[in-house]
Image: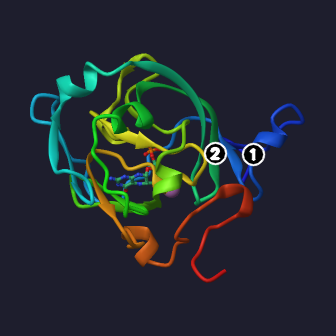
Amino acid sequence: MAGKFFAKPTPENNDRVPPGQYLAKGFPVLTYGDTPEINTEEWQFRVWGLAQEKTFTWSDFMSLPQHDFIADFHCVTRWSKLDVSWRGIKVTDFMELVELDPSCTHIMQHSYGGYTTNLSLEDFLKADNFFAHTLDNKPLPADHGGPMRLVVPHLYAWKSAKWIEGIEFLSLEKLGFWERNGYHRRGEPWQEERYAGL
Ligand SMILES: Nc1nc2c(c(=O)[nH]1)N[C@H]1C(S)=C(S)[C@@H](COP(=O)(O)O)O[C@H]1N2
Ligand SMILES: [Mo]
């Protein structure tokens, strides 16, 4: 697999590349289906289920603290990209605006276009997770999930929903799009949690 698009890990970064992964030289785009085109004025974000239902606008997100993030990105199709440079809003900061029912244990991410992916509440509330609107100091391109995506660095990248439009809060684990189609319910790359039932 090494060559034009992929590189073997080097001794310097080897301990940051999970088993079975290669380093991508660029930043590949991986999308199932069409790329939705949404501008920041029409973009909305809704929370519902076991949280008081609320809709947020782009400016609601912009008025939250903004941070730079450097995070590694691991796609289950075996490419990884180290040190991706993003800017956005911490999930934990956003969640201060959400009134969560104590019975909530899981969440579902919902995207424009219909993509879904699930997380346990614990995996969603990790301090390192963030909503990203900027990549390499430029507005997040549509093919990488702009105007806004979630980034969950500690799990395989299919858990980082592009074009995110809402979170459904749940008291049981529901499965998202890839999880219903044979992928692992959690997807931790260091444990190689690639497929369900393995
Ligand atoms: N809405 C949506 N989010 C998505 C996907 C998708 O097809 N639709 N693909 C997932 C997968 S499999 C990966 S690897 C990453 C890829 O992100 P990128 O295209 O920015 O590299 O987005 C994830 N989020
Ligand atoms: Mo992926």
Q: Which mark is residue 147?
A: none
Specify whether tag 2 is near ligand 1 (CB below 8 Å): no
Give the labeled residue for mark 1. 17
Q: Pinpoint residue 118: horizontal percent, then vertical percent.
A: 41, 63
Task: Confirm or deny contact between disc 1 and disc 2 (CB under 8 A).
Answer: yes
Quadrant of res 172: bottom left
Q: Residue at x 20, y 50 (%)?
A: 52
Residue in front for this viewpoint, 83 or 105: 105
Asked where in the image residue 55 lies, by quadrant, the reply is top left
Name the residue type under label 2: Ser
What's the distance in space between the residues labelled 1 and 2, CA to CA?
7 Å
| Residue at 39% from the left image edge and 32% from the top image edge | 132
Q: Is residue 112 above or below residue 131?
A: below
Report crowding for label 1: few under 14, some 14 to 19, many 20 or more residues within 10 A (C-alpha).
many
Q: Is the residue at mark 1 in contact range of ligand 1, meaning its CB lies under 8 Å from it?
A: no
Percent x, y for residue 30? Answer: 44, 51
For the question of whether residue 38 can be seen, the reply is no
Which picture quadrant has residue 73?
Answer: top right
Residue at point 83% right, 42% down? 15
Q: Position of residue 37 (x, y in %)?
A: 18, 41
Circle 2 Cα neighbour tier, 10 Å, few/some/many (<14 / 14–19 / ≥20): many
In the rendered view, does 23 fall on the left or right side of 167?
right
- The residue singled out by tag 2 in the image is 80
Going by the numbered disc 1, the residue's amino acid type is Val
The C terminus sits in image quarter: bottom right
